[in-house]
């Protein structure tokens, strides 16, 4: 190992003039009340927002905002190959639709806050300050590779792919190679730099995997982490940091108190603990969130992968799920006592729920569309008619022009439809997604209306016609509900159908049918369906002329 680390540090990072101490001053400890949490979301802008990403992001947002802390967005764009133009902006907009808003960080149009830049690609100089420090402290060293060597490595890899690999031997060879590289001399460094050979910066890992450090993850509980002895890469040959290095530097300088991320990072924790130690940084608290699982065809649990239905968050908008419904579902999965709280607090917003880390699932949440639909129905049933109207219209504008046209031509009319069966103790639950709106409201719009269901064979056409004509003869739109229904009962009776359900049930043979059948004759004629909301209200909304026209049309078509 090179002894003159000062010279080595200067050779490798001649351009770095700032010191770590100056960095500490530039990004001072945050002045926040006791207990306030600073959390972040650090997505890679790949253009794909995984539904599972909502879990760590929601936990981060809740914990920060519930404690009066700060929640910021850091764009982890160190992997240019995976980056998609405009993806960060798309992501910010998507999350905002879900009520996830950042106090600080990479916001639309730039950065907001004193701890930036918040895009890793713009933090290169900051990383290099700490890279230089690690070299100076003897904790990091360069590994040069000439172009020829890189080529050679590629061919070795190809051959190795063909042959069965001896992993043990390879690991040993790699370890020997790593140890050899640690022995680079100052002269070799100079030669390589002069030849323009690129280098990666590696950590000099002095851990002993036999030794295990006790560590408490706030979700996973007490863990024993074996020390790291792998000289992992800190800076890639283009000077861009790896996730590990960027994570340590950024979360320290941005004063993150709680690192909330997917459990796929758990195996790297040993590296991070070591890196924080070498850098002299205080370790933040960690919450490793279990990956989202689904049941496969055989009922076995498997990871919800990118290609699975429901994995892409953007699909939910297209499918017509209201963000509030999705968030309600996420909350039910995130905290085991959420549903209980919801029953006790039916009218509160989910942000009023006291989110508790201790109630999080250690082993992983199971994604299930049926449950999402169930939750969704409940949430929509409790929305106001105005909210349903606004959201359904917004969805229709993007997804169904015909529906959008119907809904927008008379907002009050549309709202009166959505008001049916809303507001009481047992609200109607017709809508799971905004895609359900069209088949629900179609009967109220002549351009969408059609007869979808037919009468059961056991009713005679003559009876149906008689009932419909009798209704037309007596129909008065000004009737109240009782008067309206009394007339239907009278029609039933005049045709030998029971007007009283109890009497009918006691002796069904004595009747041709009952008043519910007569109502059904009307329902199919007026709504086109066997199942529809309350007929009296439907007729009031449709108005006299349309009710009469539809009944007449049915009589003519029978
Ligand atoms: N960019 C990392 C990822 O997308 C972030 C992980 C973290 O939150 O630290 O997985």
Image (spheres, helix red, strand yellow):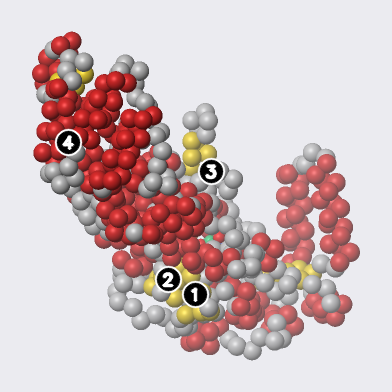
Disc on the earlier residue, 2 or 1: 2
Mark 2 near mark 1, Cβ–Cβ under 8 Å?
A: yes
Q: Is mark 1 within 8 Å of ligand 1?
A: no
Q: CA distance from mark 3 to mark 2?
A: 28 Å
Residue 182: numbered disc? none
What is the CA distance from the residue labelled 2 to the residue labelled 1? Answer: 8 Å
The count of marks equals 4
Label 4 and label 2: CA atoms lie apart by 62 Å
Mark 1, other Cα within 10 Å: few <14 / some 14–19 / many ≥20:
many
Q: Quadrant of the N terminus?
A: bottom right
The reply to whether discs 4 and 2 touch (Cβ–Cβ < 8 Å) is no
Q: For marks 1 and 4, give the CA distance.
A: 64 Å
* Circle nearer the N terminus (4, 3): 3
Q: Is residue 13 above or below residue 366?
A: below
What element does badge 3 sit on? Answer: loop
Taking the spot 39% from the left edge, 80% from the top edge, the residue there is 30
Answer with mark 1 or mark 4, whichever residue precedes in sequence.
1
Determine which residue is flagged by label 4. Answer: 474
Q: Split into 4 quadrants, where in the image is the C terminus?
A: top left
189 left or right, relative to 435: right
Which one is in front, 203 or 336? 336
Within 8 Å of ligand 1, the CB of disc 4?
no
Q: Position of residue 123 (x, y in %)?
A: 60, 78
Which residue in the structure is indicated by mark 1? 107
For label 2, the residue is 102
Element at label 1: strand
Between circles 4 and 2, the one closer to the viewer is 4
Marker disc for residue 309:
3
């Amino acid at each position: 190992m090179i002894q003159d680390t000062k010279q080595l540090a200067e050779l490798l990072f001649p351009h770095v003039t700032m010191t770590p101490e100056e960095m500490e001053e530039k990004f001072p400890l945050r002045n926040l009340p006791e207990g306030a949490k600073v959390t972040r979301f650090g997505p890679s802008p790949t253009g794909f927002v995984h539904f599972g990403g909502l879990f760590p992001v929601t936990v981060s947002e809740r914990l920060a905002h519930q404690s009066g802390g700060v929640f910021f967005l850091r764009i982890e764009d160190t992997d240019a190959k995976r980056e998609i133009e405009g993806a960060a902006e798309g992501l910010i907009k998507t999350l905002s639709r879900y009520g996830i808003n950042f106090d600080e960080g990479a916001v639309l149009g730039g950065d907001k806050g004193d701890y930036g830049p918040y895009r890793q690609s713009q933090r290169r100089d900051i990383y290099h300050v700490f890279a230089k420090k690690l070299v100076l402290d003897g904790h990091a060293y360069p590994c040069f590779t000439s172009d020829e060597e890189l080529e050679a490595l590629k061919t070795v890899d190809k051959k190795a792919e063909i042959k069965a690999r001896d992993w043990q031997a390879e690991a040993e060879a790699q370890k020997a190679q790593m140890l050899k590289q640690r022995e680079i001399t100052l002269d070799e460094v100079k030669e390589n730099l002069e030849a323009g050979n690129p280098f990666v910066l590696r950590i000099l890992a002095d851990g002993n995997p036999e030794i295990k450090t006790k560590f408490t993850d706030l979700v996973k509980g007490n863990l024993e982490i074996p020390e790291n002895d792998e000289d992992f890469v800190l800076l890639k040959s283009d000077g861009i940091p790896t996730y590990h290095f960027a994570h340590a530097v950024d979360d320290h300088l941005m004063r993150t108190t709680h690192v909330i991320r997917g459990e796929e990072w758990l195996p790297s924790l040993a590296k991070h603990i070591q890196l924080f130690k070498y850098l002299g940084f205080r370790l933040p608290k960690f919450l490793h969130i279990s990956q989202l699982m689904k049941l496969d065809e055989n009922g076995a649990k498997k990871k919800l992968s990118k290609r699975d239905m429901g994995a892409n968050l953007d699909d939910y908008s297209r499918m017509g799920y209201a963000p509030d419904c999705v968030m309600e579902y996420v909350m039910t999965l995130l905290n085991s006592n959420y549903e209980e709280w919801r029953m006790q607090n039916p009218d509160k917003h989910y942000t009023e729920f006291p989110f508790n880390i201790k109630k999080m699932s250690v082993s992983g949440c199971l994604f299930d569309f049926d449950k999402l639909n169930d939750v969704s129905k409940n949430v929509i049933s409790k929305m106001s008619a105005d909210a349903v109207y606004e959201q359904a219209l917004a969805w229709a504008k993007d997804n169904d022009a015909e529906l959008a046209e119907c809904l927008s031509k008379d907002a009050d009319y549309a709202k009166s439809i959505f008001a049916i069966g809303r507001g009481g103790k047992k609200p109607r639950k017709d809508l799971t997604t905004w895609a359900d709106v069209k088949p629900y409201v179609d009967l109220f719009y002549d351009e969408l209306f059609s007869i979808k269901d037919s009468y059961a064979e056991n009713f005679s056409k003559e009876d149906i016609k008689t009932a419909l004509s009798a209704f037309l003869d007596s129909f008065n739109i000004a009737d109240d509900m009782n008067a309206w229904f009394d007339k239907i009962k009278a029609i039933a009776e005049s045709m030998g159908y029971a007007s009283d359900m109890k009497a009918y049930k006691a002796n069904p043979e004595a009747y041709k049918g009952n008043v519910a059948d007569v109502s059904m004759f009307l329902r199919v004629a007026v709504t086109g369906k066997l199942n529809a909301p309350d007929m009296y209200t439907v007729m009031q909304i449709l108005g006299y002329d349309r009710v009469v026209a539809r009944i007449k049309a049915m009589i003519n078509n029978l």
